[in-house]
Amino acid sequence: MPTPQRKVPFNALDRQNGGELGARMADAARRVVAGGWYVLGGEVDAFEREFAAWCGTRHAIGVGNGSDALELAIASLGLPAGAQVAVAPNAAMYATLAIVANGLEPLFVDVDPRRATIDPQALASALTPRTRAIVSTHLYGTLADMDAIDSIAREHGLAVIEDCAQAHGASRDGRRAGSFGTLACFSFYPTKNLGALGDGGAVVTSDDALAARVRQLRQYGWKEKYDVTVARGRNSRLDEMQAAFLRLKLPLVDGWNARRRAIAARYARDIRHPAIEVPPVHGDDQVAHLCVVRSERRDALRAHLAACGIGVDVHYPIPDHRQPVFGERYAALSLPVAERLARTSLSLPCFAELDDAEVDFVVDASNRWSG
């Protein structure tokens, strides 16, 4: 059977990065090239100030990518080897890998079935005397219950790192993602709500000492050039070209988020198939980085939509505690909500440049599924 021509892409970065914005980015690229300074220069300085102000923090430190942001944020805390860091197991290992890379132990905690973010009640029950920090991932663009998580952290003296890679601009009570924790980490991978034209990331914080530590860690651990005073340093720097592109896009993110949210709300309202569960859209605390539906017959639904020419994906198919890299280490650990999400979740197209006719097509195809 021939593969159908795709009618609705899962993503289409050329739509965002073309037209007037593309022309402005081309001008910015020429400006950076002509300036002759390409790493940690004026564009990065300006973006760090602008992004920190946008997030509502005192500092933003540009780094090479979102994974480095997580590793460096954790490293800046100076936790003892073997300490535990609590983390949800349903976010593709990114935070877990950063924990392990720092010589620490992930403490896997189940997630809230509605938000798919770390469950505060499960978190409180899972903590041990060796737990020193929490990574709270705002999965799919939905803010975790940060009031409850911060309360638990204060009670037990724990640091909180927000993983905001999918939640640029999500807000609650006037506070944006990134302003709740001890530190927060962002990715600017091209598909993110604020995406560069390559890799990039940032750590944000209002703690002056931790900001200074992260700045050292991103550049070899230098206090001054060639003077290494902090262990675990590396070369992880946001470059001038990507910072220039991000500066142009930052003022547009709230508008793009509103469109993403509207698409997700349309799916929630109009997909009426009894075998497809579409989570509700909450409001400003949800920026619809991904629109993830659930079905006990996920693979059949995925095949049906693909046959209709609709781009879909699974975020994410293997919980962290079931990853082969751990062997049988967590074989006895049962996290039923995360395990069900891995089995049932399917991501539909949801990006700001998706047009209404394409949304209609996805809704119609979903409702026509024979599942």
Image (tube, rainbow, N blue to C red):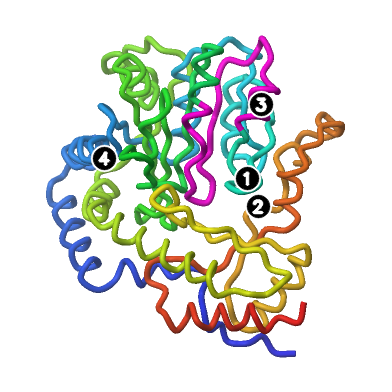
Q: What element carries label 1?
A: loop
36 in relation to 298, above or below = above
**Closest to the observer, 282 or 299:** 282
Q: Which image quarter is the C terminus in?
A: bottom right
Q: Left or right: 326 with respect to 308?
A: right
Q: What element carries label 3?
A: strand
Magenta stretch in the rendered image:
120-149
194 in relation to 70, above or below = below
Label 4 to label 1, Cα distance in Å? 26 Å
Of label 3 and label 1, which has the lower sequence position? 1
Q: What element carries label 2?
A: loop
Of label 3 and label 4, which has the lower sequence position? 4
Label 2 to label 3, Cα distance in Å? 18 Å
Q: Left or right: 142 with respect to 54?
A: right
Of label 4 and label 1, which has the lower sequence position? 4
Residue visible at 67% across and 58% down in the picture? 345
Residue visible at 69% across and 71% down in the picture? 302
Residue type pointed to by label 1:
Ala
Queried whether the magenta region covers residue 332, the answer comes back as: no
The residue where tag 3 is placed is: 106
Of label 2 and label 3, which has the lower sequence position? 3
The residue where tag 1 is placed is: 92
Rendered location of residue 296, percent (x, y): 77, 62
Residue type pointed to by label 2:
Tyr
Disc 2 + disc 3, Cβ < 8 Å: no
The residue where tag 4 is placed is: 51
Residue type pointed to by label 3:
Pro
Queried whether the magenta region covers residue 137, the answer comes back as: yes
Number of residues whose C-alpha sits closer than 10 Å to that of mark 2, classed few (under 14), some (14–19) or many (20 or more): many
